[in-house]
Image (cartoon, grey):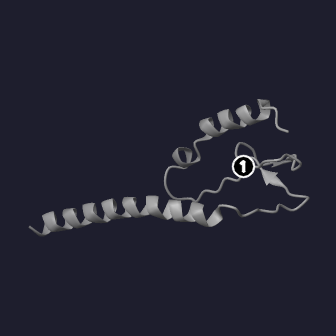
């Protein structure tokens, strides 16, 4: 009986955390809407595939800032293939 209660408690925690994370994501996005992030003029970036710094053209009209933590599935969260396709799309657009 105790084992069933423990399993149900764990399931309840998992379900309640999943629903809160979606709500938290929306509130974080709403907080950041309309804000501007100002990057320093000279900024070094580190590539994920190498241990070298990368020079980035900061003169573009748009930037994609990605943040991740060490928990969870990194490749799932980053969605690198989708970002690469989106960046290609933006590079080929005629931006005025």
Helix, strand or loop status at disc 1: loop
Q: Nearer the viewer, residue 79 or 70?
A: 79
User: Compared with residue 21, is residue 65 higher up or lower down, i.e. above or below?
Assistant: above
Residue placed at 26% from the left, 64% from the top?
12
Q: Nearer the viewer, residue 12 or 45?
A: 12
- What x and y, as percent, mark residue 94? 82, 32
Q: Residue furthest bottom?
A: 2
- What x and y, as percent, mark residue 56? 85, 47
Give left or right: position of 75 versus 32. Answer: left
- What x and y, as percent, mark residue 76? 52, 45
| Residue topped by disc 1 | 64
How many dots with numbers? 1
User: Compared with residue 66, is residue 50 higher up or lower down, i.e. above or below?
Assistant: above
Q: Around disc 1, counting alpha carbons within 10 Å, would you say few (fewer than 14), some (14 to 19), or many (20 or more)?
A: few
Q: Nearer the viewer, residue 54 or 19?
A: 19
Residue placed at 8% from the left, 67% from the top?
1
User: Compared with residue 71, is residue 63 higher up or lower down, i.e. above or below?
Assistant: above
Residue 50, by quadrant, is: top right
Name the quarter where the C terminus is drawn.
Answer: top right
Give left or right: position of 19 versus 9. Answer: right
Residue 83, by quadrant, is: top right
Give left or right: position of 42 versus 32. Answer: right
Give left or right: position of 33 versus 2. Answer: right
Q: Residue furthest left?
A: 1
Residue placed at 76% from the left, 49% from the top?
63
Residue placed at 41% from the left, 64% from the top?
20
Residue 36, by quadrant, is: bottom right
Q: Nearer the viewer, residue 45 or 63?
A: 63
């Amino acid at each position: 009986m105790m084992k069933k209660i423990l399993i149900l408690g764990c399931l309840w925690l998992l379900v309640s955390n999943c629903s809160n994370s979606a709500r938290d994501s929306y509130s974080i996005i709403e907080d950041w809407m309309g804000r501007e992030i100002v990057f320093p003029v000279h900024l070094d970036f580190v590539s994920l595939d190498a241990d070298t710094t990368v020079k980035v053209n900061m003169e573009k009209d748009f930037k994609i800032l990605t943040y991740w933590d060490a928990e969870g599935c990194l490749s799932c969260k980053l969605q690198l293939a989708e970002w690469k396709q989106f960046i290609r799309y933006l590079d080929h657009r005629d931006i005025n």
